Amino acid sequence: MRVCIDAVPLLVRSAGVKNHLYHWIVHLKRITSDGAISLFPFLNRFGELDHEHSQTGPLSTLARLALLHVVNLPGNASLDWLLRGVDVFHACKVINPPRGARLTATLHDMTCWLMPDVHLPENVEAEKRFAALVLRKASGLIAVSENTRCDAARVLGLDPARIQVIYHGVPESYFGVAPEAVLQATHKHNLLRPYILFVGTVEPRKNLPVLLDAYAALPAALREHFELVITGPIGWAGEETIARLHSPDPGIRYLGYIPEPDLPGIFAGATVFTYPSLYEGFGFPLAQAMAAGVPAITSGVSSLPEVAGDAAILVDPRSTQEMTAALERLLLSPALRTELARRARQRAERYRWEICARQSLKFFEQVAGAL
């Protein structure tokens, strides 16, 4: 069986999708023979994960993106020639897939349908076009959570029997982070006080204004002892949110984008992790915090209760009062933090890339077997 994966997101700035694709491909290649997994557009060797930059040089990136444009032209059958002998093609940005292979894709979330106001209009248009040209025609689909599977079936009218739930993984570096790694990362980023952590792209869906307001409502003694540390690149957030991060209130620090190697130590060094997102298909940062053994507060909506189980405090993401109360409760209770950390490590064991890769390989075999 030969599988070709559309790896175009590795060429552009991206967060969750790029994270998933990078680790997924690495682990699929580890458990398959040489040549079983290939990448389009011919990106078979790449370096360390970098969310901000392409996996290849500028000219090589431009050439590959130009090829993507060409193969996506209506009626262009060049992929059938370029990918001859491929049994399964897993699409991501290709909307004119080869006709000689079984078509699959990953359902990450349904926010462009359920919450279009939190996305750029061009992103919404692109997602809906991908759904029409790829998702509705696919022989099989992977959903990253049961919540995403149900939403996709309901919103797009897809047959649930064609959708298999396979959870994302968390890199091994987040499990059992060494004290030395915590010390190195926290000192590098000048995190010298206990801190509450948020990790994620700064965009409307992440709901940062509620977190900022909730922190401001904490008793002064807690704000003096615990910083609120926000990390992640600026996405398409509103001007007011960006202004609040660049000129923060006392106790709030915005670190911007943190290189991937530093993140496990940053996570493991946190007293509490907060993730008040309005909707997630899976929620990478929550799973990473759990693997690092950090007690978490997250939203009781979308996939987040499914991912967290009993290992986090769930709140209404639109309620500043609930978020403040949860923060105060957790910050004042070392015993509760210890118990949630224990549960988090235990539950995170299901979010291993090795498990994800093996389940995905079986999925591809089932789809290919229908040829």
Image (spheres, rainbow, N blue to C red):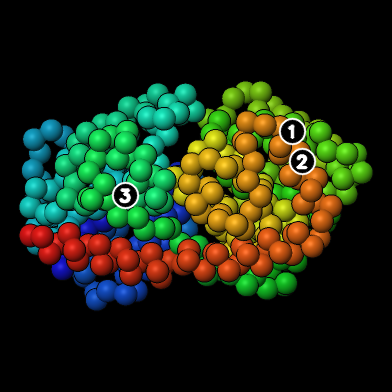
Q: CA distance from mark 3 to mark 2?
A: 37 Å
- Asked if the residues shown at circle 1 and circle 2 are in contact, with their CB atoms under 8 angstroms apart, the answer is yes
- Residue pictured at 92% horizontal, 44% vertical: 221
Place of residue 207 in the rendered image (x, y in percent of width and height, measured from the top left):
60, 34
Front: mark 3 or 2: 2
- Residue pictured at 11% horizontal, 54% vertical: 101
Q: Residue furthest front?
A: 310
- Amino acid type of the residue that numbered disc 2 sits on in the rendered structure: Ala
Mark 3 lies on residue = 106
- Asked if the residues shown at circle 3 and circle 1 are in contact, with their CB atoms under 8 angstroms apart, the answer is no
- The label on residue 321 is 1
Mark 2 lies on residue = 325
Place of residue 1 in the rendered image (x, y in percent of width and height, measured from the top left):
15, 68
Query: Which quadrant holds residue 111?
Result: top left
Tally the numbered discs.
3
- Amino acid type of the residue that numbered disc 3 sits on in the rendered structure: Thr
In the drawing, does residue 158 fall left or right of residue 150? left
Q: Secondary structure at mark 3?
A: strand
Mark nearer the N terminus (3 vs 1): 3
Identify whether 71 is placed above or below 349: above
Identify whether 112 is placed above or below 22: above
In the drawing, does residue 210 fall left or right of residue 87? right
Q: CA distance from mark 3 to mark 1?
A: 36 Å
- Amino acid type of the residue that numbered disc 1 sits on in the rendered structure: Gln
- The label on residue 362 is none
| Quadrant (top left/top right/bottom left/bottom right) for the C terminus | bottom left
Query: Which quadrant holds residue 217?
Result: top right
Q: Nearer the viewer, residue 89 or 64?
A: 89
Mark nearer the N terminus (3 vs 2): 3
Q: Nearer the viewer, residue 84 or 336?
A: 336
